[in-house]
Amino acid sequence: MRALREVQEDLRGGRTTVAAVAQMALDRIAAAAQLNAVVCARPEATLSDAASVDAHRQAGETLPLAGLTLIVKDNIAQQGWPLTCASRILGDFISPYDATAVQRLRDAGAVVVGRANMDEFGMGSSTEFSRFGSARNPHDPTRVAGGSSGGSAAAVAAGLCHAALGTDTGGSVRQPAAFCGVYGLKPTYGRVSRYGLVAFASSLDQIGVLAGCPEELLAVFRAMAGKDPRDETSEEAPLPDDDLSINLSGLKIGLPREYYGEGLSPEIRRDIERLQERLRSLGADVKEISLSHTRYAIPAYYIVANAEASSNLARYDGVRYGRRAAQYETLEQLYVRSRSEGFGDEVKRRIMLGTYALSAGYYEAYYARAQKVRRLIRDEFLAAFADVDVMLTPTTPMPAFKLGEKLDDPLAMYLSDVFTTPASLAGIPALSIPIGKTAEGLPIAAQLLGPHFSEGLLLKTAKYIELNCGFGQ
């Protein structure tokens, strides 16, 4: 996929049209069907939208994202498109409206070219829990693309679009971005409206962006961020400017020692240590810090997230919309059979765990305690950011694993999010950046963490690393 900057130069010079760019994206999607990254394309709707953007440009309107092709995860609403969350229980439900993020991007000139595969309701770390089958990693189709936004990451990595929307509850943008070798941003909680996002864990869910370079990621983020009266949790904060230049001299970069312990792949450790030394040589103040509550992040996250999922998914009962059991005699049978037939195994597992954590006699022991731990994790991050500007950590403990390798071991699957869940619990922004490759050619990534509303600083740091450090150098 040609860079957006080049496409927009050709648009200004009259050498191409948005419709032609959209058609090329549709052709690439069709040619890459084996990746199973895109689960729905509507060429007529896409080309109609592209023609509308061309008409507005010809009328003299300035559209900052004209020429940008976008793929949207299947749990974010688009009017007239299927909205299934990769689940049988939603059947062939068609969204009657646009999510705020989608509407803002379309208003800025972006054209949606497809819907991305995902783990059912965002519950998974490999995009193997999907009614559409597994998404595949473009670097090695025998390996996972990550999850739950695996389809979005694979689509960007394969050049099917300029950018893709994903959702990040505990790492579901950053982890697949790391596995597929692209940039993946989880914004500050509340930075992007959740209106039109199907809820998994409402206090954690955030729409994020995946792109092949910091500039295109920034352009998409700037267009969709901001306060939304339809989402009371959304926040108003100044947008980062479009200048990604930064002077690294004196920038304080923290290295949380808890992220560099046992279980980290030797190749990932090697490339991150090389990056640390390079940043020191370029003038950054790189120093070790401690986040002692990190070890509690995974258990706290899976209690909070599953409890909220249990509550949010209670609405899928076979009555109001989506799949309904074909045979039932009582209302209870309708509920039970619709949910049993509609939900996949991973979703059922998380609903049961969450319901248990919220049940009488266990609420205080599990859910309430997990929320207290969550506050400790957040406060520890805030205290650390009084001494450092950003933090540098691995994004994942290992590169992309083989398809099917962890399906029989849910705990091992959950641990692939060990470095991403703390930022989600704290509500701070986090950015996964590609920094190298393994001997087998699999991407290696690092993660940048910053204080609330510091997305601009994270992107500036990422751009500096891209220009001055090289990948794996």
Image (cartoon, rainbow, N blue to C red):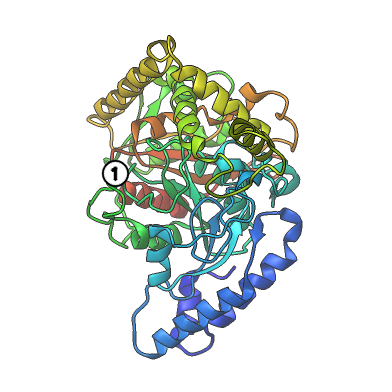
Q: Is residue 35 left or right of residue 44?
A: right
Q: Residue at x 56, y 60 (%)?
A: 94
Q: Residue at x 43, y 69 (%)?
A: 106
Q: Nearer the viewer, residue 338 or 112?
A: 338
Tell me the residue that label 1 is attached to.
233
Residue 264 to residue 338: above or below: above
Q: Quadrant of residue 268?
A: top right
Q: Nearer the viewer, residue 22 or 184?
A: 22
Residue 352 to residue 102: above or below: above
Q: At numbered mark 1, what does the secondary structure look like: helix, strand or loop?
A: loop
Q: Nearer the viewer, residue 129 or 10?
A: 129
Is residue 35 at all visible to an observer of this figure? yes
Give percent across and percent down for residue 48: 54, 80
Is residue 267 at all visible to an observer of this figure? no
Q: Residue at x 36, y 46 (%)?
A: 458
Q: Residue at x 44, y 11 (%)?
A: 362
How many labels were placed on the picture? 1
Amino acid on which the number 1 mark rests in the picture: Thr
| Mark 1 neighbour density, 10 Å: few (under 14) some (14–19) many (20 or more) | some
Give percent across and percent down for residue 394: 50, 33
Residue 99 to residue 137: above or below: below
Image quarter (top left, top right, bottom left or bottom right) of the N terminus: bottom right
Give percent across and percent down for residue 59: 37, 90
Image quarter (top left, top right, bottom left or bottom right) of the C terminus: top right
Give percent across and percent down for residue 29: 67, 65
